[in-house]
Every structure is written in C-alpha cells, then in structure tokens.
Amino acid sequence: MTCRTPQLNRTHEQSAPRGTSCRSEMSGDRENTRGHMYPDKSRLIETGGGATYRKHSAESSPDGRNNRNQHLRAKLNSTPKNSPRPPALPLFVAPSAKSNSKVISNAVCWTCLSGVPDKPQQQQALKAIANHPAQQYVILFRDHIAKKFRAIYTYETESAKLKRIYGKGPKTIVSSMLSYLYKYDSGSRAFTDLSTSTFSLSVDGITIKNELWRKAGVYPC
C-alpha cells in the first residue's frame, strides 16, 4: 500500500528552486516574523496586566526633554524682571459735584417767570445764567409765603458767599442773612422747604430775613 503525496506539496516542490526545501522557507518566514513576536524590550512598559508598548515621541527621548527645557529657560530669561505693573484702580472715587444750572433754568421757565408778561424778564434771567458759568445757582424770593422772584445768585465756594448776577436784592448774601432754604422739584415744578438752616449744594432757593429788605442798599418789595 502506497501513500500518495498531495498535489499541493508536489507543485510546491516543483516551483521551489533546487537546493532549497519547504523547511528552509518556513524557517525563513519564522525569522521574518520574529521581530513582531518578540518586540524590543526597551519599548515596553511593565504594567500589572502585562507589557504594553511605549508611545515613541521626541519629548520622551532625552534630547527632546533637553530641547524643551532649553526653550523654557530662554522664554523666562527673555521676560524682563522689572516690567512695569499695570496701574492699580482706585478703591474710591470722590463724586464730582454737578451743576444745577439746568434745574434753575427750568424753575425760571416753568415756575418763577412762566407768565406771558414775564417773558422778557425770563429771557434776561436765562441769559445771565448762560453768561456766568458756575457750579451752584440760587434763586432769591421776597418772602416765604408767596415766593415771588427777586434775583439769581451764584455760590462762591472759596468765600462761602452768594453773589448776585441778575435781579434786585443784596449784592452779596452770607449765611447769617438766610431765613428759609428750598429745593426745587422738577416733577411737581414747585419749591419744597428744607428742614435745615445750613446752606449746602442741594439748595436751589432762599429767602432772607424780612428786616434786611428795609435797610439801605436793599431794594424794597
């Protein structure tokens, strides 16, 4: 009884060159795949579950780390040590006092000199306000009840005096001459009493003591 050789092996032997055999080719294939079966140990990282490949990069090599350190040192050295700091913001800014020229102008137009016969006097009063720029304007009334318009004053902070710029009344007024103080309400277009006898920048209207109108130099009512 004879054993037949498979046709596949026969053709393989015929196609192979002389002096070689299937065994030699198989051994060559093993040698080619040996690199994949046994990787380089320097590229392995030991873990609890086995070995894994180490990701190769320029930073993982000693040369890559040196280049990175040199780059960081150059960046730090290029930054000026005594660079100017940004200016610190102030913690508190003192509020600037606003002029009440618009409030006084509205009071002249809508309350004090709002009638048709008062139109020329109204224009003169507004012109005096425009020609005398100031921080604080004050209207002088004849009395507390009727509040009849008499004059317009500006407040001088240095001398703490009221100086007349238009109308009839004392040329200057000091705090000892004051009788009533008022604040103008633009919504109701009326002057309201202030519960204080001390002059401040919130005052828009005043009256002086009644006996001052009868003294020399003060215009009578």
Image (cartoon, rainbow, N blue to C red):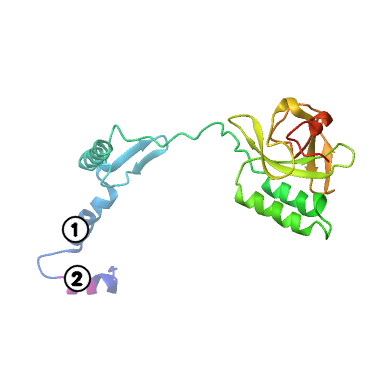
Circle 1 sits in a helix, a strand or a loop, which is it? helix
Eyeballing the image, is 128 above or below 159? Answer: below
**Which label number is shown at residue 13?**
2
Prevailing secondary structure of the magenta residues: helix
* Left or right: residue 101 compared with residue 12: right
- The image quarter in which residue 163 lies: top right
Please state which amino acid type lies under the numbered disc 2: Glu
Circle 2 sits in a helix, a strand or a loop, which is it? helix
Eyeballing the image, is 117 above or below 138? Answer: below
Q: Is residue 208 visible?
A: no
Outermost residue toward the top in this view: 176
Q: Residue at left 51%, top 33%?
A: 90
**Which label number is shown at residue 106?**
none
Which residue in the protein does label 1 denote?
A: 28
CB within 8 Å, label 1 to label 2: no
Q: Residue at left 19%, top 58%?
A: 28
Q: Position of residue 130 (x, y in %)?
A: 63, 52
* Left or right: residue 167 compared with residue 9: right
Real-space Cα separation, disc 1 to disc 2, in angstroms: 16 Å
Outermost residue toward the right in this view: 145
Q: Quadrant of the C terminus?
A: top right
Q: Which residues are magenta?
A: 11-16
Q: Is residue 12 magenta?
A: yes
Q: Is residue 27 visible?
A: yes
Pointer 2 local density, CA inside 10 Å: few below 14, some 14–19, many at least 20: some
Q: Quadrant of the N terminus?
A: bottom left
Sooner in the amino-acid sequence: mark 1 or mark 2:
2
